[in-house]
Amino acid sequence: MMRAVDRARRALVPAVVMLTVTHKCQLACAHCYQANHDSEDLSTEELIALMDELVQMGTLDVVFTGGEALLRKDIFTLMAEARKRAFAVTLFSNGGPINAATARKLRELRVMRVEISLHGSHAATHDGFVGRQGSFDRAVRAIELLDDEGVPVLVKSSIVRCNIHEIFELQKLFAARPRVQFVSDPTLFTKDDGTSVMHERATPEMMEQHHAERFSTMSSADLANARTLLSEPPSEAEVDQRHPCGAGRTLAAVQPNGDVLACIHIPTRPLGNLRQTRFSEMWLDSEPVRALRQLTLQKFTECQGCEYRHVCAKCPALSFAESGKLEGHSKQTCETTKAYWGAIKKRLAEDGTRAAQGAEVRTLDRVAPRVPGCDDTTPRRFALRVVGG
Ligand code: SF4
Ligand code: SF4
């Protein structure tokens, strides 16, 4: 039976829509892609009208994000309206505004997941990262309260050079709470005013060392999976036809001012604005979505011949930021992919005999997508369950 996401992909349904309901935020994270935290936000009525249209468009998941989405006074009204329309609801939060009552409310709304950003295993690291003392304690408390209520929680951590040494310890913080999931990601996006934060990135050498440690505990089954992925790539012709991600095909984003985007990380190419044009009109035909729908891996000409082309975490947003072209070469993507898969290759070489003994092959778990909907296509964004993020 065809899965809903496959049907959405074929029909170009905006299956996942990210609503940035405000840019306002009580924190000041150094790596945040939003340069400006003032925003004139769409009203409650405008967002509800959009949700009505999304029902007609076949949307499945609505993600509420910010800034800090919980700073909107009407956030629970909006979430309740989304649930009334049978959307699966995800909330991104820094955890600061979450107290016992908030956690209970989120449970009552039956949100699918709350994703909390946490960037260090110690208060000093996280608080320094987000620019506000006490943030670590508030985020940890939020995670505990949500988990106590039975709300699924995903802890998300950006890997940068100042916290990379704490990532494994951070992952262990919630070891006694098996429902709490953890992912980490070294990707950094240029701020939406064009300011670069790339000096914060962990170097390729740091990432290689990090991955080597991660992969040192891979099970033989995961090793077998990785071996299969690398040694039995699909044909070049098949890879050529793949799309890099779901942007503009199954994924859309809405800015606080009503700009509609194909991806939250391509803010300079809006499809249009909700205050002038209906969402459906923009989604069905506008230049930015046409460009993304025609974008296949064949167009990334600098990648022809690369051994990682079928597993590369290609991101048109990074390509665009670095080269001005959706199909341009992204140094960051390239370094991230090569550090990750290069470390797996080394691990496979060390463990050749054990992995070759026919361990059970099973489906690999996904790496954290940069945004929900990134990963609508192939095993490129898949990782090994054992490494946990
Ligand atoms: S890979 Fe993800 S972040 Fe990059 S353009 Fe696609 S949807 Fe956006
Ligand atoms: S690893 Fe680099 S060269 Fe290879 S496919 Fe990815 S971006 Fe292209």
Image (cartoon, rainbow, N blue to C red):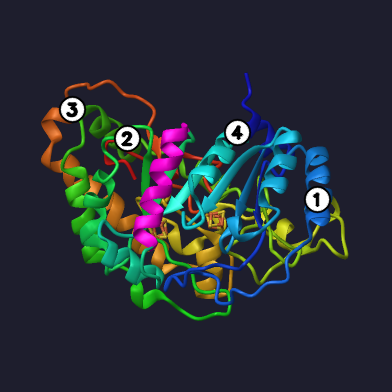
From the viewer's perspective, is 271 left or right of 356? right
Q: Quadrant of residue 218?
A: top left
The label on residue 356 is 3
x, y percentage for residue 351?
A: 13, 36
**Residue extent of the magenta highlight:** 135-150
Q: Residue at 71% of width from left, 53% of height from top?
A: 74
Q: Nearer the viewer, residue 366 or 229?
A: 366
- Tell which circle, 4 or 2, labels the residue nearer the N-terminal end: 4
Where the C terminus falls, by quadrant? top left
Which residue is identified by label 4? 108
- Tell which circle, 2 or 1, labels the residue nearer the N-terminal end: 1
| Residue 186 in view in this figure | no
- Tell which circle, 4 or 3, labels the residue nearer the N-terminal end: 4
Q: Nearer the viewer, residue 267 or 335?
A: 267
Q: Amino acid at mark 3?
A: Ala
From the viewer's perspective, is 85 left or right of 358? right
| Residue 192 in view in this figure | yes
Number of residue marks: 4
Q: Amino acid at mark 2?
A: Arg
